[in-house]
Image: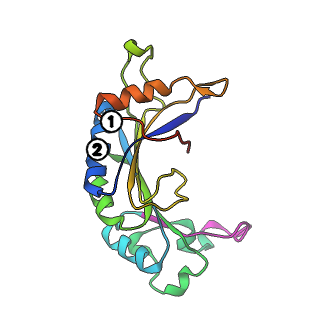
Amino acid sequence: MSNDIAYPVFRTPHLALALSTARRLMEFGQREYSAVCVYAELHSVAEVQRVAKELPEGRFRGREECGEFDGVPWEDQPALVVGVRGPGLPVDPAAYEGRMPVECELDGLPVGSIEDAFTAAIGLNRGWINWEGLRWPDAPEVGFDGESKHAEVTLLFNTPTLELNEHADDHTVLVHVRSVCVDGRERREPYAHWIAEQVGLAVVGPAQRW
């Protein structure tokens, strides 16, 4: 079993530049089977309803208390709790009480199918686009073999952290590689630097984990 680790390689307050930069990095490792996932946290009913209109195919899921529905059949639980597509969201604002934040997610989509629409819809909400199924090439000049399992690119919106637990007025691009930690040191960090350099970027902060 192995884990990945992500290094920030670009930050900007400009949405379009953030997306184009992330795409440039993604395209460096893109393969036929590469896919994209998107995720956002929405903290008001108005934002849920707005995003649902812009991304009707998104799956929306509200928060539930630990054990709230223990023993309740799945089909008897509120649609907002089990997850529902945009057109199926409750209209009554009261249905959202205790359910914030509402998550919006789409996964396993073809590269290029959702990124523009999601970027246009994100607003001030925190979220991410994640490209997976990439492959980083061999880098013999720095002593590293290529990477597939942990080759990903993430674009964070309005937050600097993968946990989405901090707000920011800019957006961050991260490159993922395999984590190999020996004596407290990440041995494959130079590989992340090398990958970034191939598309004119550079590591700009400490590593993060999902």
Residue 69 falls within the magenta-colored stretch: yes
Question: In the displayed structure, would residue 122 be above or below residue 190?
Answer: below
Mark 1 or 2: the one toward you: 1
Total count of labels: 2
Which tag, 1 or 2, sits closer to the chain's start? 2
* Image coordinates for residue 205, horizontal then vertical, percent: 47, 41
Question: In the displayed structure, would residue 43 be above or below residue 91?
Answer: above
Label 2, secondary structure: give it: helix
Based on the displayed image, in which of its 4 quarters is residue 97 positioned? Answer: bottom right
Q: Is residue 38 visible?
A: no
Residue position for label 2: 21
Boundaries of the magenta span: 59-74
**Tags 1 and 2 in contact by the CB under 8 Å rule?**
yes
Q: Left or right: 154 with respect to 198?
A: right
Label 1, label 2: how many angstroms apart (C-alpha)?
A: 9 Å
Based on the displayed image, in which of its 4 quarters is residue 46 positioned? Answer: bottom left
Label 1, secondary structure: give it: loop
Residue 201, label in figure: 1
Q: Is the image coloured rainbow, by chain, by secondary structure, or in one colour?
A: rainbow
Amino acid type, residue under disc 1 in the picture:
Leu
Nearer to the camera, 40 or 7: 7
**Quadrant location of the N terminus?**
top right
Residue 39, label in figure: none
| Residue extending furthest toward the front | 204
Nearer to the camera, 75 or 168: 168
Helix, strand or loop for the magenta stretch, by majority: loop
Q: Is residue 180 visible?
A: yes
Residue 163 falls within the magenta-colored stretch: no
* Image coordinates for residue 156, horizontal then vertical, percent: 42, 52
* Image coordinates for residue 131, horizontal then vertical, percent: 38, 43
